[in-house]
Amino acid sequence: CLSKRQVLNTIRQMQKLLSAQEAVYLQGTRNIKKKLTLLQSTVIRQAAKLNGIPCPPRLDAPSNGKRLGNKFSTGHEVHFLCDAGFQLVGSETRICLDDQTWSGQQPFCKNVNECASNPCLNGGTCVNDINRYACLCPSGWSGINCHKSIYSLCSPDWVTVNNSSFSRQPRCADVQGSQHCSCDTGFQITGRESSLCQVDIDECELFHLGKLARLCMDICINIPGSYHCSCPAGYNLNSDQRNCDDTDECEKSLHNCTGDEICMNYFGGFQCVKPECPKPHLNTSYVKTSIFQCEKNPCPMASKACKTAANSISFHYLPLRSNMSVPRVLFKVSTTRFRGDSLRFSIIGGRGRNLFAIQRSDRQTGELILASPVLGPATLEVDLEMSELSRKVLLGKHVSKLTIFVSQYDF
């Protein structure tokens, strides 16, 4: 039999052997995990190269419509819809093909002409509007389709107004011994003795009272027998003579920005901006690498404040119409150089930051959401931070500084 000493030596040798085997096993497991991680990264990069080639050009939503789908790479589909009162002309769905071209034709939204069926009776004039119509009735007729008679042959309801600049001669006929007169579209009979078509129907007033469909996008000016539209400063009247198009003062060199400033157009105006890097603070300084980008200079070895500061800062300027519907995605931030295992998105500052929210659309993309309507004119600021982490350890930060110019108009 073995002595106690021999038994103890044998146990110690077995423990050493097991410890050595355990160390080898753990080292092997770590090597396998590293290889699997490397393989996963390689596969993801290759898949991104194969499937991440976008189709030019980028497809935008048609005017008076919507685009469904935010991915423009090979194999992805983009769908299009029109707002109420409009009809889609073109391809409802377009696919990014393997040769980096889009299938189908770029669609547009065509206004449905509700006046095509001639709904206005008794000589009424049909005014087409978005998803509805209105009838301008001649004298003596009223109702949605000018189907109700106002004046009887015996006692016409006349009003006397003296304004020669709005005069027209009526069309009159004798019917069973009494005279019956009518006026051109846009006028009413006035004056019991002269029976002039003297009072113009103010279409603009009817529009403002809500009795007529929207005639003009902004300013309606009444003229004898009709009306015309006008736009505020910063807009041009569209060829349809009703809508207003924004004037791009920056593109047309109608601004007064100096040589070191940048002109940024927004709806109804422009703004001169001069993005600048933050001033040096707590051993942290930045250098401008492009017009809208700043990069952090190398940090001193012992400066914790510098190491936790943003690695880069970018500047963005967005135009926004007044009182837009919400929620609405205004801005997206993402990265293609992803070193860590997670990204964190947050709002860290700005003027009016309580109007915004942040959400994640996928693993590597954050979206800035306008959560409350904003009445213009107003200038809002929001600082959006994207932090990259590995096992909860900060690897780097990027800050997007957004300035949002809200127009005083909703068009």
Image (tube, helix red, strand yellow):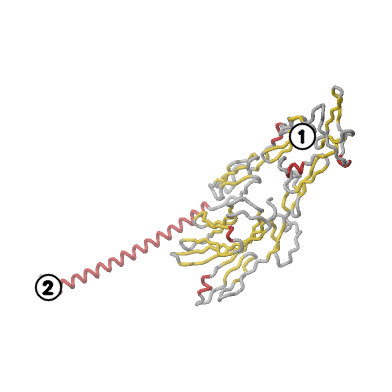
> Seen from this angle, which residue lies furthest front?
155
Residue 189, given in percent of the width and then of the height, sits at 84, 34
Sequence-first tag of 1 and 2: 2
Is residue 89 visible from the viewing direction of this image?
A: no
Residue nearer the viewer, 310 or 6: 310
Q: Residue 6's x, y, as percent? A: 15, 73
Give residue 215's quadrant in the image. top right
The relative height of residue 158 versus residue 352 in the rendered view (above or below) is above
Name the residue beneath numbered marker 2.
3
Q: CA distance from mark 1 to mark 2?
A: 123 Å
Count of marks overlaid on the render: 2
Closest to the observer, 118 or 247: 118
Query: Where on the picture, by quarter, is residue 149?
Result: top right
The residue closer to the viewer here, 40 or 147, is 147
- Residue that appears at 53% across and 60% down: 335
Answer few, some or many: residues within 10 Å of disc 2's Cα (few below 14, many 20 plus, some between 14 and 19).
Answer: few
Point out which mark residue 137 bears. 1
Q: Quadrant of the N terminus?
A: bottom left
Position in image of residue 185 (x %, y %): 80, 35
Residue name at image x 79 percent, y 44 percent: 228
x, y percent for residue 334? 54, 59
Q: Residue at x 34, y 63 (%)?
A: 28
Q: Label 2's element?
A: loop
Tell me: 236 left or right of 311: right
Give, as a three-letter code, the residue at label 2. Answer: Ser
Q: What amino acid is found at the position of numbered circle 1 in the picture? A: Cys
Q: Are marks 1 and 2 in contact (CB under 8 Å)?
A: no
Regarding mark 1 in the picture, which secondary structure is present there?
loop
Residue situated in front as seen by the camera: 199 or 50 = 199
